[in-house]
Image (cartoon, rainbow, N blue to C red):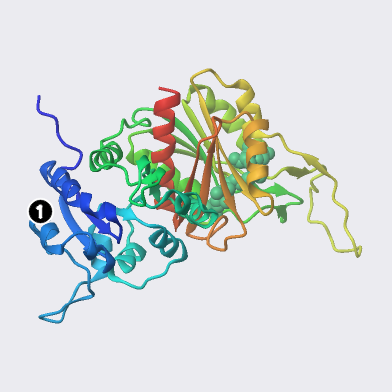
Amino acid sequence: MLRKSPFKHKKILIGITGGIAAYKIPQLVRILKKEGAEVQVVLSESAKSFVTPQTLSVLSEKPALSDFFKSDQGEWNNHVHLGLWADLILIAPAGANTLAKMSHGICDNLLMSVILSARCPIFVAPAMDLDMWTHPSTQSNIQTLVNRGVHMIEPEEGSLASGLEGKGRMAEPENIAHVLSGYLAPKPNYFLGKRVLVTAGGTQEPIDPVRYIGNHSSGKMGFAIAEQLIQLGAEVELVYGAVTVVPPTNCQSYQTRTAKEMKAKCDEIFPTCDVLIMAAAVADYHVVDVAAEKIKKTDDTLMLALAKNPDILKSLSEAKKEHQVLIGFALETEQEEFHALEKLQKKNLDCIVLNSLNNPKAGFAVDTNEVTLFCKDGEQYHIPTQQKDEVAAALLNKVGDWLSKTNP
Ligand code: PMT
């Protein structure tokens, strides 16, 4: 059977910046075109000293762009359109200057504007001299970009244009194509046919018939995860607490109120599930003596005795069978990574998803979130601020990849 290339019909934008390795990019364009990709080249001004737009236009069968306007007709090369057109952007070669500009959002040419407008995955193939590569400012810019989800194609070791030997050579075109091909190749869908228990929303702990202790969870994050899982072909069991939005209808769902009720429902369903994703915000304490009648405001102060709630996630992890996978969330306000990793370990989880209340566009109630996934083997993955459904899709994609490798 003929192999279907992962590049077939993929729209790939290659951004070339100034550096001697630019002379290798025509070869990469040829490889990608041969594999069936549509290639659009955008060059920085300095890239033209190393490779001609004419060569790239001929090989890509599209004008190689570098200016905001086509000089003869004054027509606009719409950077927003280019950023949205691409399925994948590759910046190669990317020098220290380009990495610094990307990390700081500097937007002083067409290529930088395209990068800032892009919504697709961005790959970067750095190329520079060895001391520039190891310089703390370059490494810090790289870390910033990686934390934002940019994919680095590590430079290779060897002789450099300066005559020195060391790390800094741009990866060879064949190797770059190999990395992109691995990324674009269809992945096994881990969640297809899996039974997944998802929790969402906040629990409420009654004080009296009219009052309760609760939190700001809307249910949006957990519901977004449930929706995405349904689209991936999973059989979803949804247990939710107090919410402000409507739950998905195309799965089994159960509304509970208190942490104890949520635990009872999860205890019932979990034994038949393959995966648990615990996005609910569960109250850690409940009121010891819930008043039977509405408490009157007779005194200036009111003392409520609180007792610890069961930890649903921890108790399920203690009951877990070998094949079962547990994923928790951690909502933090300080020493975020430390606390998330502590919960990962103490609750014996496979992964934990950290979100922080220090980002006003993350966490409770808002439509967006920014999360970092920590897996028990040390792998981590950051998902920048996006709509909760996009975060859910990216998260499940990453978790699915990780589980396919570690828990096939
Ligand atoms: O619903 P939204 O408005 O969209 O907001 C989403 C969210 C912020 C609620 C969600 O993204 C989130 O972070 N959920 C977990 C919140 C939380 O309770 O975090 P935690 O760090 O206190 O708890 C750690 C983990 O243990 C969580 O998976 C929690 O569900 C679980 N837990 C906590 C206490 C308890 N008694 N039992 C538990 O199982």
Determine the residue located farthest toward the right in the rendered image. Answer: 299
Horizontal side of residue 29 vs 161, given as left or right: left
Instruction: Choose between 193 and 207: the one closer to the eye.
Output: 193
Q: Residue at x 33, y 41 (%)?
A: 231
Judge whether 76 appears above or below 402 on screen: below
Judge whether 284 appears above or below 402 on screen: below
Residue 347 seen in the current view: yes
For disc 1, the neighbor class at 10 Å (few under 14, some 14 to 19, many from 20) is: many
Instruction: Choose between 359 and 280: the one closer to the eye.
Output: 359
Q: Quadrant of residue 19?
A: bottom left
Instruction: Choose between 407 and 294: the one closer to the eye.
Output: 407
Instruction: Choose between 93 and 394: the one closer to the eye.
Output: 93
Judge whether 407 appears above or below 165 on screen: above
Q: Quadrant of residue 1?
A: top left
Q: Residue 377: x and y, percent? A: 54, 30
Q: Quadrant of residue 115?
A: bottom left
How many numbered discs sit on the rendered protein? 1
Tag 1 secondary structure? helix
Q: Residue 261: x and y, percent? A: 63, 37
Identify residue type, mark 1: Leu
Residue 259 seen in the current view: no
Determine the residue located farthest toward the front in the rendered image. Answer: 163
Q: Which residue is mark 1?
A: 59
Quarter of the image that includes the C terminus: top left
Horizontal side of residue 20 vs 327, given as left or right: left
Horizontal side of residue 403 vs 243, given as left or right: left
Q: Residue 234: x and y, percent? A: 37, 33
Find ligand 1 in the image and state its quadrant: top right
